[in-house]
Amino acid sequence: MNFKTVSVAVIAAVVAIQFIPYGKDHTNPPIVSEPQWDSPRTKELFNRACADCHSNETAYPWYSNIAPVSWLIAHDIDEGREHFNVSMWGAQKKNEGEDAAKEVREGEMPIWFYTIPHPEAKLSSSEKQELISGLEKTFGKEEEEEK
């Protein structure tokens, strides 16, 4: 195969995958209820760093319309909402928020690759501590495992 043939095949594949509907539905489900935030600052920090995947208030960027990126974004949002969704407060598992602060403290959230196109989600050290404290006050602390 020559370069031209490979190039045409790649372009054809990229065009063809745009017709796969997964990741193209950018509607947000209704908000059922929200937690009682300990402060407006906690809610603000959560919205900056977490809400796109952990609420029904996702702001979809322009590139979320282009496959295969749209597939990855849809998957992350689906998984994030399933695990922890502040817009479905009370409709999820009972202790749904207890590990939120732990995830932030351990650097698990926000996911590193989310902060690349969303620099506002990259929190300073003091903002991270504020968010952790606010999440603990809002949702409680996850109980330490016994050793």
Image (cartoon, grey):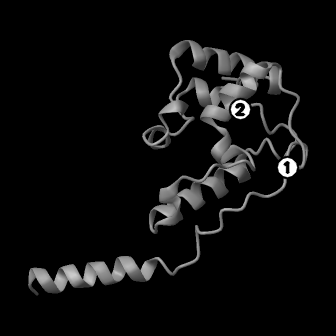
Measuring 59% from the left and 17% from the top, which residue is drawn there? 127
- Which numbered disc covers residue 31? 1
Measuring 64% from the left and 47% from the top, which residue is drawn there? 53
Q: Is 24 situated above or below 143? A: below
| Residue 34 position in % (x across, y down) | 86, 38
* Crowd band around label 1 with a 10 angstrom C-alpha radius: few (<14), some (14–19), many (20+): some
Tell me which numbered mark, 1 or 2, is placed earlier along the sequence. Answer: 1
In the image: residue 84, left or right of residue 118: right
Identified by mark 1, the residue type is Ile
Q: How many numbered discs?
A: 2
Q: Residue lying furthest top in this view? A: 126
Measuring 42% from the left and 40% from the top, which residue is drawn there? 116
- Which numbered disc covers residue 22? none
Q: Residue lying furthest left in this view? A: 2
Which quadrant holds the N terminus? bottom left
Which quadrant holds the C terminus? top right
| Residue 50 position in % (x across, y down) | 64, 37
Q: Residue lying furthest front in this view? A: 62
Secondary structure beneath label 1? loop
- Which numbered disc covers residue 99? 2
Q: In front: 131, or 103?
A: 131
Secondary structure beneath label 2? loop
Q: In front: 144, or 2?
A: 2
Which is more foreground, mark 1 or mark 2? 1
Q: Is 95 situated above or below 36? A: below
| Residue 114 position in % (x across, y down) | 49, 42
